[in-house]
Image (cartoon, rainbow, N blue to C red):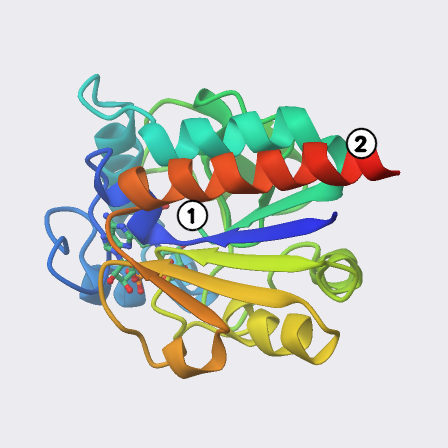
Amino acid sequence: MKVFVLTGAGISAESGVPTFRGENAAGPWDVEAFHRYSTVGAFEHDPAGVHRFYNGLRASVADPAVAPNAAHRALADLGRTLGADLTLVTQNIDDLHERAGNPSVRHIHGELGKIRSVSTGEVVPWLYDVPETDSAWRPHVVWFGERVLGLAEILQQVVTADVFVAVGTSGTVPPAATLVHAARAAGAYTIEVNIAATPASSVFDRRSTGRASVVVPDLVDKLIKEHHRQARLA
Ligand code: NAD
């Protein structure tokens, strides 16, 4: 059984990282500031402002109060059980899936904990403030107008999935928002986990309404049981 999981900001909300939209939106995770500072043009005209904004986000995720929750941990269990049969794709730029022990995570919107050389494209881990005077290195984050990372491979995986799960995503940011359509068209059973209905809800075969930290462990338990059942039959 192949499982494809797409996570969004909602999975990290209970870990203390606010979402852009919905009831948790707050603090440095301000959607208007994100729009202002997340373009190549903004970095060219105001690298200090861009670094200040991303330094703020980096610091907020490094806060000791921010830690993986039961949903991140359950998906790590699923990854250890399914191995290559789990594709875990996140729109999040935080590192909570990794901190929970997920063996393999694809960050289609990049990673806050990395920076990229503007001239060579070299990517290095970076957990500290970037000096505001530095215009040679930029956040390793996908900005508006830029291509998401690894899309071709992700599309290959999504059309071979038996089960597609979207957790804590508003389904409004393309191309991630289109993945459920590709999965469904290829025959996957599709499940949405969210505290509220989203514009994409009607596309899914099943909606599990509730907090990710409650719904995801239960769902993962069922998926692991099904995996073992199919393994016994094989
Ligand atoms: P979004 O902010 O647009 O939507 C969040 C969704 O999560 C909403 O539908 C909300 O109802 C749901 N939600 C909130 N709390 C939840 C909970 N406890 N359990 C289940 N669902 C919950 O998020 P998105 O769709 O991921 O938007 C995409 C953009 O936001 C991405 O580009 C992403 O990089 C960025 N973002 C990332 C982070 C992060 O890295 N943690 C945080 C904020 C925004």
Q: In the displayed structure, does residue 107 sit left or right of residue 200?
A: right
64 shown above or below 164: above
Q: Which one is nearer the viewer's eye here, 111 or 179?
A: 179
Q: Which residue is mark 1?
A: 92
* Cα separation between marks 1 and 2: 35 Å
Q: Quadrant of residue 112?
A: top left
Q: Secondary structure at mark 1?
A: loop
Q: Quadrant of residue 224?
A: top right
Task: Report the quarter where the C terminus lies.
Answer: top right
Mark 2 neighbour density, 10 Å: few (under 14) some (14–19) many (20 or more): few
Counting residues from the N terminus, which is met first, the one under dot 1 or under dot 2?
Answer: 1
Extreme-front residue of the structure? 233
Extreme-right residue of the structure? 234
Q: Which residue is mark 2?
A: 232
Identity, as a three-letter code, of the amino acid under mark 2: Arg
Whether ligand 1 has any atom under 8 Å from the Cβ at mark 1 is answered as: yes
